[in-house]
């Protein structure tokens, strides 16, 4: 452990603002990108699934079983 | 020459979107899990256990995210350029999809490198920004990324956009050696490289080991993100084919995120 107390750890020898801002930015950015990647995939799959279901329903109504 | 033809056939099979989709689904957990573990270890090690620097005190701890981000920003661009070459010369569609998946990830890491560097510069150099060679060429890299992303999305026809973006990605590759050697070619505030392949690191092991862990963690994270996003791009571009329809229909509202992981 390079720090004697939690207070020292947060203060980072007076440079806490720069260190914690850097780490906060990178961690937030990575989490947002992971979230955006997953949410985008899910949304697109849902849309496509509904579209396929609609196409199938239309095909059944018009008497075309394929 | 038969073996050469066989090899080429094997390559073409591997990079066909469908086969690549299946294969990459198996690779994904091998990058995602190590990424999480390495980053968790590296963050704690770098922030709390690595000793302070004798000159910079604790502000140097930004190095543990700054160097991996900058390294990935450049590697990511190299990946874009490699994909560009493969898609332009050999017309491999999968390379276009990987490029489209990787560009925003690389751009984000480039932004991280600039932002964390700026936040490190203030306590160390007394300024957030200087227009010197290393910083300016890195800013240019961010603009190149943004240009590539803009072109990829500029056309109704995805193939046309991919081609335009590939040409820009290839032209922009001259910026990479400029970034790499800028600290040697010009006088700059920026410190020299911490790691060189041919020499011993310029830091003691208590500092470079956590940096190495973070570097590996960032690369695994990058690989996992690019693989996941490439798989999504493949489904989008191939949505009219039978095998993608089957994958779409096999998903449910809850399990949509793990689409095709079973397929």
Image: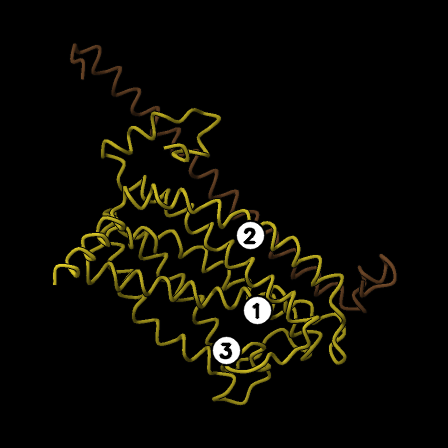
Chain colours: A brown, B yellow
Parent chain of label 3? B
Distance, label 2 to label 1, CA atoms, is 16 Å
Quarter of image, res B115:
bottom right
Distance, label 3 to label 1, CA atoms, is 15 Å
Distance, label 3 to label 2, CA atoms, is 23 Å
Closer to us: mark 2 or mark 1? 2
Residue matched to label 3: B197
| Rendered view: A1 above or below A33 | below
Callout 2: helix, strand or loop? helix
Q: Position of residue A44 (x, y in %)?
A: 38, 34
- Image disc number at residue B244: none
Q: Is residue A41 left or right of residue B237?
A: right
Quarter of image, res A7:
bottom right
Closer to us: mark 3 or mark 2? 3
Parent chain of label 2? B
Quarter of image, res B87:
bottom left
Residue matched to label 1: B67
Q: Position of residue B118 (x, y in %)?
A: 61, 70
Q: Nearer the viewer, residue B223 or B30?
A: B30
Residue placed at 31% from the left, 46% from the top? B20
Q: Position of residue B109 (x, y in %)?
A: 51, 61
Residue matched to label 2: B35
């Amino acid at each position: 452990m390079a720090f004697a107390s939690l207070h020292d750890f947060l203060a980072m020898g007076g440079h806490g603002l720069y260190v914690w801002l850097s780490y906060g930015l990178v961690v937030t950015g990575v989490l947002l990108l992971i979230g955006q990647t997953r949410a985008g995939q899910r949304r697109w799959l849902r849309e496509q699934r509904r579209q396929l279901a609609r196409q199938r329903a239309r095909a059944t109504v018009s008497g075309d079983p394929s | 020459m038969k073996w050469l033809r066989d090899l080429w056939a094997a390559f073409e099979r591997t990079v066909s979107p469908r086969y690549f989709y299946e294969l990459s689904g198996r690779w994904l957990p091998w990058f995602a899990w190590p990424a999480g573990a390495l980053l968790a270890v590296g963050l704690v090690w770098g922030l709390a256990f690595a000793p302070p620097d004798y000159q910079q005190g604790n502000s140097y701890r930004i190095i543990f995210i700054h160097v991996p981000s900058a390294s990935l920003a450049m590697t990511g661009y190299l990946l874009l350029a490699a994909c560009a070459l493969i898609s332009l010369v050999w017309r491999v569609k999968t390379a276009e999809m990987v490029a489209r998946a990787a560009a925003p990830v690389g751009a984000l890491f480039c932004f991280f490198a600039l932002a964390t560097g700026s936040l490190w510069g203030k306590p160390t150099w007394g300024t957030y920004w200087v227009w010197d060679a290393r910083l300016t060429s890195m800013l240019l890299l961010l603009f190149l990324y943004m240009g590539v992303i803009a072109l990829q999305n500029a056309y109704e026809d995805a193939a046309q956009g991919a081609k335009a973006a590939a040409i820009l990605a290839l032209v922009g590759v001259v910026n990479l050696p400029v970034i790499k050697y800028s600290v040697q070619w010009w006088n700059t505030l920026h410190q020299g490289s911490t790691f060189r392949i041919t020499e011993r690191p310029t830091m003691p092991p208590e500092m470079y080991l956590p940096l190495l862990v973070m570097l590996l963690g960032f690369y695994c994270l990058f690989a996992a993100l690019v693989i996941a996003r490439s798989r999504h791009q493949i489904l989008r571009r191939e949505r009219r084919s039978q095998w993608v329809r089957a994958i779409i229909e096999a998903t449910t509202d809850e399990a949509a995120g793990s689409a095709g992981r079973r397929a």
